[in-house]
Amino acid sequence: MPAFTRLSPPSQGTAIRFEGGHPVVPDEPVIPFIRGDGTGVDIWPATRRVLDAAVQAAYGGGRRIQWFKIYAGDEACQRYGDFQYLPEDTLTAIRQYGIAIKGPLTTPVGGGIRSLNVTLRQLFDLYCCVRPCRYYAGTPSPHRHPEELDVVVYRENTEDIYIGVEWAADDPVGQELLRHLNETVIPANGKLGKRQLRPGSGLGIKPVSKMGTQRHVRRAIRHALGLEGRKRHVTLVHKGNIMKFTEGAFRDWGYELATTEFRAVCVTERESWVLDNLAKDPQLSVESNARAIDPGYDNLTPAKQEVICEEVGAILDSISESHGQDRWRRMVMVDDRIADSVFQQLQTRPGEYSVLATLNLNGDYISDAAAAIVGGLGMAPGANIGDDAAIFEATHGTAPKHAGLDRINPGSLILSGQMMLEFLGWHEAAALVNHGIGQAIANRCVTYDLARMMDPPVDPPLKCSEFADAIIHHFPQH
Ligand SMILES: NC(=O)C1=CN([C@@H]2O[C@H](COP(=O)(O)OP(=O)(O)OC[C@H]3O[C@@H](n4cnc5c(N)ncnc54)[C@H](OP(=O)(O)O)[C@@H]3O)[C@@H](O)[C@H]2O)C=CC1
Ligand SMILES: O=C(O)CCC(=O)C(=O)O
Ligand SMILES: [Mg+2]
């Protein structure tokens, strides 16, 4: 049992274990929590109260969370000393118990410490950031049909420009690297022409690996396999037209995984067009099918036309028997979209999307943008999942201007706690939280953020702590 320098684990309860990436959960799991900076002081106590009430109501004492307070951010500096933002005790606790829930932590812009949130994800290899965005009836929204949005953002959490390998513009090592790139690396790559980096630029590295992509997309596809009908759909979101070997590779490795490891249960969008065309006209030639899937076919060079015909032929040879005659309609549809168009399509055609598999930066942006449609950041939960650990946290940050005022919406962290209950397999308790929050909103029991958008506005709005009470009050009676 590792020793802690300044922590006292609960005297009761045991750790969850991970077997094959799945948690094995005792009836009294020890769950470490980090209160968080800023509005963490408001939303954490509200969340804890709701989760404890749900577990009590669902299991009547047969199950209980043994909470274990651990420290990060400003609170850690108070306890452990200056600049001790992420003490070793905290890391030991998460390693030992395999799970944690946390409030938001501050990251300065520009200089100063690197993000503690990102560091935790990297240290524990929590490679999937899972952020569901779904609508609770009665939630005010700037959209006319927010109920059409029901997506889960699967954001890769350990790679991309968040890796934190970067150099300031005035860093001599960075400028040495820049010179090396200009003088040796760029000229050596015959395709980069006379391109040169401007001296005095800051530099950052954007790594994207096949392993990192495929383990992430694997979880996204598995998630979609648990859904029904048109929701069995994974969209690979990327900016691969511009960043070909990072974002473009993410798309290609995603498709590769879908069409190899998941071949029996996945169809790509283009494959579905080919199979559908053939189902509608069994006599259709390969060339006519190619023309149908590529409307610009007749304007292409013969060489490009041949490539498309070969693609169609390969699809028909390999999967027309296993996936044809509409069998593909029951499978997971995998398609891809360029990231900027996804931002507008989530607003104009939200119902067309389900699981969005993204790289780190795109997922960070998209999860905030999608949350805006279904009530804003106060309703945006999240989970960081790896093979040996999981940390649950809201999508938003510390919202410092609201800190300590008992005003902010705790819904995001409460719903992150609900995700944690689902992760533990405590579905009955999770269902109570879901029901309670839905009913509280439907009855106009809301905090300021939702209250100001409601028609007519709710005045006065509930406090943060009162919203927690309202959720518990709206648990269904047994
Ligand atoms: N995982 C984490 O811990 C994260 C940490 N951060 C960090 O948080 C700090 C502040 O970041 P900032 O850019 O201000 O973004 P925030 O997400 O903290 O807040 C921006 C705005 O979003 C709204 N908002 C946020 N949380 C809630 C909530 N629970 N209920 C209702 N509305 C909410 C508020 O809008 P309004 O005032 O209009 O009501 C708030 O002013 C930074 O240091 C940043 O790095 C950021 C994101 C994630
Ligand atoms: O770590 C931070 O400060 C910001 C992280 C963030 O925006 C996110 O994870 O969505
Ligand atoms: Mg963010």
Image (cartoon, rainbow, N blue to C red):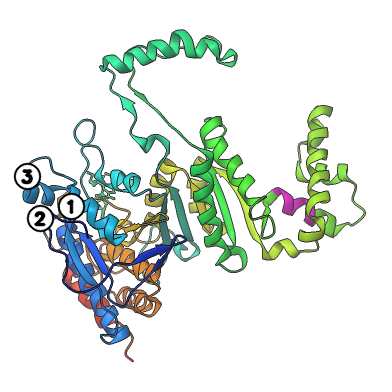
Q: Which residue is mark 2?
A: 6
**Residue 84: where, in percent of width, then height?**
13, 43
For disc 3, the neighbor class at 10 Å (few under 14, some 14 to 19, many from 20) is few
Q: Quadrant of residue 95?
A: bottom left
Do callouts 2 and 1 mark residues in contact (Cβ within 8 Å)? yes
The residue segment tinted magenta is: 270-276
The residue depicted at 35 percent of the width and 71 percent of the height is: 421
Q: Which residue is mark 3?
A: 81
Q: Is residue 229 above or below residue 399?
A: below
Q: Is residue 359 above or below residue 203?
A: below
Q: CA distance from mark 2 to mark 3?
A: 12 Å
Please state which of residues 273 and 91 is positioned toward the viewer in this rendering.
Answer: 91
**Which kind of residue does numbered mark 1 sit on?**
Asp
Residue 435 is one of the magenta-drawn residues = no
Residue 195: tell me if it is visible.
no
Q: Quadrant of residue 427?
A: bottom left
**Which kind of residue does numbered mark 2 sit on?**
Arg
The residue depicted at 36 percent of the width and 36 percent of the height is: 163
Residue 273 is one of the magenta-drawn residues = yes
Q: Which quarter of the figure is the N terminus placed in?
A: bottom left
The residue depicted at 24 percent of the width and 70 percent of the height is: 458
**Residue 102: where, in percent of width, then height?**
25, 58
- Classified by dominant secondary structure, the portion drawn in magenta counts as helix
- Left or right, 265 with reference to 283: left
Q: Secondary structure at mark 1?
A: helix
User: Sequence-wise, which precedes: disc 2 or disc 3?
Assistant: 2
- Left or right, 15 with reference to 346: left
Q: Which residue is mark 1?
A: 89
